[in-house]
Structure formats: C-alpha cells, structure tokens
Amino acid sequence: MLGFLLRLLPFWVREPLLIVLGSVLGVRLMYLAFRDGHLVTAGLGLLFLVFTAIRVHLVVRALRARRNPQPATSADGAAVGAAPPLPQPQPQPQAQVQVQPPAGTGPHPGPDTAKKKEPEKHNAWAQAFAALALFGVLGATVWLGPRFMPSDDITPRPETCSDATHEKLPKAYERTPRPVTGEELCKALNRPDLAELLGTPGETATTVSSNNNTAALTDGKVAEPDAEIAFDTYTVHVSATYNDLTTDQYVKLMKYGNEQDIRTLKVLGRPAVLFSDHTMEIKIDLGSGGSGGPVGQGPLARTLSVALDRKDHGGSCDITVWSQNGALPGDSALLAIAEKVLPRIPERPAR
C-alpha cells in the first residue's frame, strides 16, 4: 500500500522524500550500531545509505537531462528514432518567382502551443513548492521528534510509592485523630536527596514499600503505619506509632532492654532519643527436609525515635537505618532525614 502511494507522487516529490527518509534512517541505524556494537544494525544502516545514494544519482541525472534536452544519437552520429532521408527530386533549370512575405509577418505560435507551455510552467512551480514544503515538514519532524518520542536512555528510574491500590484502613486509624498513612510516610521518605543524606550520593532506590499496619500486641487498636526504602548500601525504615507511650517512658524501658549507645536529644523542638539494636534475621530453607529455621540476630541498626508533638503526649516516629554488612551512617544522617520527614507528619493533638 505504501509503495502504491509513493508511485502516485510526482517524481520531484517522491525522490526527495525517499532521499530524506533513507538518509535519516541510515544515519540513525549506523549511530545505534556504533553505540551498541551490532553488526546486523550496521548492515541495515549501510543498506539504507546505498539506497539513498542510488536515488541521489537518479535525481542528478534527471536534473542534467532537464537542463540540456538533446536527442539521443547512435554511434554513427545519426539521431535515434529519426525518419530516413527521402530522395530529393532534381531541380529543373527554370525560372522561379519567389514571393517574399511582408516584413513583420511570419508564423505565429498557435493557441494550442501557448496553452501547453503555460501548464508545464505551473506544474514545475507546484512540484518545487511541494518539495520545499515536504522538506520543511521532515526537518521539523527530525528536530522535534526526540522531544515527543521515547528516548533510548536505559538509566534505571527511581522507585515510586504506589498509590494505585487504596486498601481500607483498619478501624484503629478511624479512632486516631489525624493519623498518617503508610503511603504518606513513603512519599515523605522517598526524597530525591535521600541517598545523599545517607552519604551515598548517586544510588537509586531498589525497593519501596509501605503498609497500614497496627502495633503488635495491641489487638489492632493502635495504628502503626510504616514505609521502607532500600538502597544498595543502606535500608531506611520509618514508622509512626500512635500509642500513649511518651519518649521519657520509652527511654526508661530501653535501659532494661538490649539497646546500646542511648542518647537523648531534641529534634525540631520535640523530645527524641537515639539508640542501637540488632535487627531480626529469619532464614527460610526451600529445600527438602524443612521449611524454615529459627529467628536469629540480624545486623546492627541505628534508630532515631522522635515524639509526635512538642509536648510529648504519647506516640513516636521512628527512623531506622541498617545495612547487610553491618556498616551504619553517622547520627547526622538520621537527624537530617528526620528534619525532612517530620514536617510531613501532622503533630498529634492534645487529648
């Protein structure tokens, strides 16, 4: 179908169109072949360039023939297609009277000749205008195409917080004044500069997740949304617990636990505490003979727990960072993350 449409176009429109398309496709394929090292792509690009060179040669020959219209001659110099010379009668020696036409008179071009020349002139101008317009459209397409067409950039894009599923919130969220959801925590944590705040600029998040959970051992009565973002080096977990436990009570409980390196401070005017603890590690055996192993001790994690309001009426926002190899960023990284995330979490009102 495309070939039939191209054959319907005039010569001076069809050939420039094929030349432009062949050159653009050929150069593009050769560039991709040079960048990716594909021999098949290089062969296709070379084929398009050869096709374009042939069309250019045909256009050049047509231009030369149009500028110098001469009848084709054979090898002996006779015009090809000309009628053979007829025998001429021998002139008789007699007086002949030649009548000279009056001056200023002579054969005038008939109306048919003038009418034929006029449409040819207009047809040539129309073809030239159509060719120029076609070149303009193709140039605009090549220039503006990369802005609207998908690029070949294969750089991994950062993970985003999924908002496609809106699951029903547990009843604990309905009884809690202005609770934050897991999706909102995820959007507050998933910042473009999060990797830079962790001291690993240039890394891209590999996994992003969020949940609208409730706190353990509360029979689903305490809302505890959370979100987690994993990088190649560190993993960051943030949660908001809407219980009645104040930061001061929390510090007293930690002294009886296994938390290490406890340090109290204030973040954005709210009571806070920094501490270290080991994560849990669960090993699952998918082979024959067993389905899993006991819960073990995972790598060390560093946590910053900040009260949900300045008066510390209960509840906290916990930001935890760990890595598989046990390395931890400095406490300044946790403080910087908290200063970015906390303003996105509404303060808990006084009860």
Image (cartoon, grey):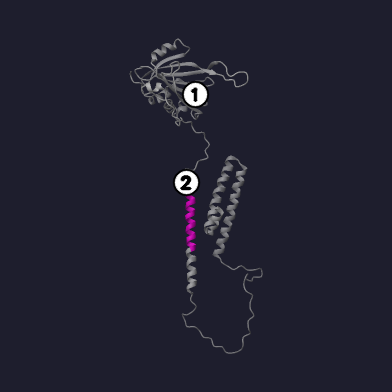
Q: Earlier in the sequence, mark 2 or mark 1?
A: 2
To which residue does mark 2 refer? 144
Label 2: how many Cα within 10 Å (few below 14, some 14–19, many 20+): few
Element under disc 1: strand
Q: Image point 59% across, 52% down: which residue?
A: 51
Q: Image point 57% across, 63% down: which residue?
A: 65
Point out which mark residue 235 bears: 1
Element under disc 2: helix
Residue closer to the observer: 105 or 133: 133
Stretch in magenta: 123-144
Main SS, magenta residues: helix
Magenta stretch: includes residue 309: no
How much space separates mark 2 and mark 1, taking CA atoms?
A: 41 Å
Instruction: Where is residue 17? Give x, y as percent.
Output: 53, 54
Instruction: Where is residue 158? Give x, y as percent.
Output: 48, 32
User: What amino acid is labelled 1 in the image?
Assistant: Thr
Magenta stretch: includes residue 133: yes
Q: Image point 57% across, 45% down: which residue?
A: 29
User: What amino acid is labelled 2 in the image?
Assistant: Leu
